[in-house]
Image (tube, grey):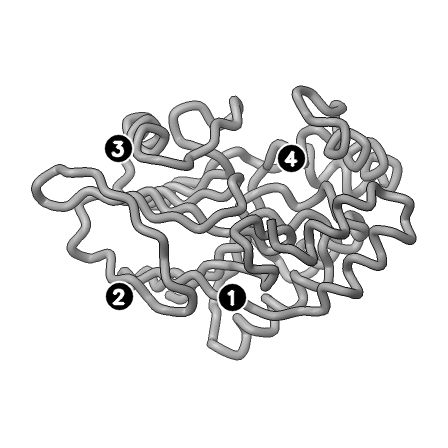
């Protein structure tokens, strides 16, 4: 089965629609959103409605939680955005976010927003130590996560050595020979790796292959919406820079 993994959409409707069209053209059979549906961007209500209408399986992210209970540990820009976001969501959207699970386990695969050791603590996975912590938190063979907005693959081979890899965009990586793997998807709605193109994952659960797909979209339009909404200008410029 070909599964699209959409992490960190962050209320960017333009980026989401571009990824949905890209995945549909490639025969995606299932859609999973790995948390942070809202926050930062100008279309939180529309993004939630879109994902609900298409029947995507969605997980809870820290910005989704913050939209319900208020920002905790956020910087000033992120806190301002999440407070604005909370005013844009109707009761149905809030109920939907409130009901989202933090993890999804299917066989030897775990889907989560942050890391597997403590999903609700929102730890980042940016290096070998973080990946080792996450892998130690579950017996799942594969962990798929978001949260950092930067693509990453941490894997162990038959020898047990944990190594890090920066995935090449649009090139599938075979996972069948990997003993275990922590897969970190880039962000659909706010990439931070220097490439402003939206990033989402294509996971072939039959062939055990994963690709990090980069999809150009109307960045200027999404940034203009942020400015018109009165959100911090930094959020618009960040989209343009991709970091």
Is mark 3 in CB contact (under 8 Å) with mark 4? Answer: no
Q: CA distance from mark 4 to mark 2?
A: 32 Å
Left or right side of 235 for 176: left
Q: Which residue is mark 3?
A: 139
Quarter in which the N terminus is drawn: bottom left
Q: CA distance from mark 4 to mark 1?
A: 30 Å
Outermost residue toward the bottom?
25
In-front residue for pair 1/88: 88
**First of labels 3, 4 by sequence position:** 4
Q: Quadrant of residue 230?
A: top right
Q: Position of residue 105 (x, y in %)?
A: 39, 40
Q: Which residue is mark 1?
A: 214
Q: CA distance from mark 2 to mark 1?
A: 21 Å
Residue ID at (74%, 52%)? 237
Q: CA distance from mark 3 to mark 1?
A: 30 Å
Nearest-to-viewer mark from 3 and 4: 3
Q: Which residue is mark 4?
A: 99
Nearest-to-viewer mark from 4 and 1: 1
Which secondary structure, mark 2? loop
**First of labels 4, 1 by sequence position:** 4
Q: CA distance from mark 3 to mark 2?
A: 21 Å
Residue 107 visible within the image: no
Residue ID at (59%, 66%)? 19
Q: Which mark is residue 207?
A: 2
Which secondary structure, mark 4? loop
């Amino acid at each position: 089965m070909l599964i699209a993994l959409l992490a960190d959409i962050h209320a960017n409707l333009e980026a989401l629609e571009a990824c949905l069209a890209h995945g549909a053209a490639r025969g995606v059979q299932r859609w999973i959103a790995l948390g942070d549906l809202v926050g930062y961007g100008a279309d939180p209500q529309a993004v939630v409605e879109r994902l609900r209408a298409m029947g995507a399986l969605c997980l809870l992210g820290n910005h989704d939680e913050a939209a319900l209970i208020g920002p905790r540990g956020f910087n000033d820009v992120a806190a301002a955005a999440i407070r604005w976001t909370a005013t844009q969501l109707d009761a149905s959207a809030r109920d939907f976010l409130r009901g989202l699970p933090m993890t999804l386990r299917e066989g030897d695969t775990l889907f989560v927003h942050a890391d597997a050791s403590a999903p609700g603590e929102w730890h980042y996975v940016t290096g070998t130590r973080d990946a080792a912590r996450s892998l130690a938190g579950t017996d799942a063979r594969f962990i798929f996560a978001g949260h950092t907005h930067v693509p990453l693959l941490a894997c162990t081979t038959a020898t047990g050595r944990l190594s890090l890899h920066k995935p090449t965009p649009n090139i599938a990586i075979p996972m069948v020979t990997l003993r275990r793997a922590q897969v970190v998807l880039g962000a659909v709605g706010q990439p931070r790796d220097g490439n402003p193109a939206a990033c989402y994952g294509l996971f072939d659960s039959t062939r055990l292959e994963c690709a990090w797909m980069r999809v150009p979209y109307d960045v200027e339009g999404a940034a203009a919406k942020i400015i018109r909404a009165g959100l911090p200008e930094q959020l618009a410029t960040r989209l343009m820079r991709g970091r």
